[in-house]
Image (cartoon, grey):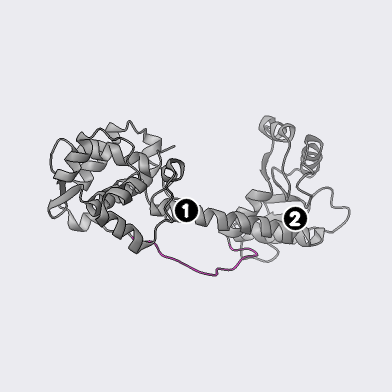
Amino acid sequence: MIPPFQKYLFPFLQLMSDGKTRSIMQIRKELSLAMNLTEEELAETYETSGQNRHLGRCGWARTWFLKAGLIESTQRGLYTISNSGKELYNSGIKNITQQYLVNHYPAFAAFAKARKKEKYSHTATDSNEVSDPLSQMEDAFSQLNNKLIDDLLRYIGEQDPKFFEKLVVDLLVAMGYGGDFEDAAKVTQFSNDGGIDGIIKEDALGLDKVYIQAKRWKESNFVGAPDIHKFMGALMSIGASKGVFITTSNFTQAALEVVAANKSLKLVLINGKQLAKYMIKYNVGVISQHTYTIKRVDTGYFENE
């Protein structure tokens, strides 16, 4: 996983300490090499915005150092270390944090206060945990989503089993399974369904179908291997080749191993958290309350490289 934002600060300053003038594109490339970042780390993106994490961290490090006066822009899109930056690098201090910049550089302190980024702590631990603004938004978004997941599972748990069966069919339709033809998706009869709770037709003639098993169970009651075997038996008895087993709880390791070892059926398992995440993604049982658009500078517009 890519290093946290503040781990970029000293390597950034160290890179610039040679006094060379660089564009942000050069900084991004050389910093990735200096920090020995892997291809996987360089490919990481923020979950909500989809922006590249490495590019975002480089951009915010540049902004912080500009505000602190540690680097300066010599001309459009080009940066070099300042005298203050050289003094900091030559001091031997490697643990450069947001709190350090606030304490030693008034211009940065004013910038940080104006933007209300943090309630600063004087402990090293808290300072080291500070992240770049996009990561802070990611954390806040993740907290809201985790609460939404819990709320969705709680609401589902308060409904009757028949409602849950309809919900999972609605979800698969929202995900693009089934079509706009008649009877493309349906819930099977409440009793004597042979372990099959829903059917999705993938074509108008019904030549290709996905069969669904839905278990609205408590979180502590895991779906085990016997339940998977029973569902597989129901599928094979009708000559089906595709099945989706959805539960509000989770699957035992033995259940997962049964599916992994199965070669005759295409079987997908979806647990409670995955179910709620799909509901959020495909807008089933949720509505949008607020929408925020995150924009960034189009560096290609300003740079000729």
Left or right: where 181 falls relative to 75: right
Q: Position of residue 68 (x, y in %)?
A: 24, 51
Instruction: Give amino acid for label 2.
Output: Gly
Please, what is the dominant secondary structure of the magenta stretch? Answer: loop
Which dot marks residue 138?
1
Tell me what residue is drawn at x 69 percent, y 42 percent. Answer: 241
Q: Disc 2 vs disc 1: which is toward the camera?
A: 1
Please identify the quarter of the rendering in which residue 32 is found: top left
Above or below residue 158? Residue 216 is above
Q: Where is residue 91 in the image (x, y as percent from the top left)?
A: 22, 35
Read off the magenta span.
283-295
Q: What element carries label 2?
A: strand
Give the spatial CA distance, label 2 vs label 1: 36 Å
Residue 305 in view of the camera: no
Instruction: Give amino acid for label 1.
Output: Glu
Nearer the observer, 34 or 231: 34
How packed mark 2 is, by other alpha carbons closer than 10 Å (few <14, some 14-19, many 20 or more), is many
Q: Residue furthest left?
A: 75
Q: Quadrant of the N terminus?
A: top left
Which dot marks residue 198?
2
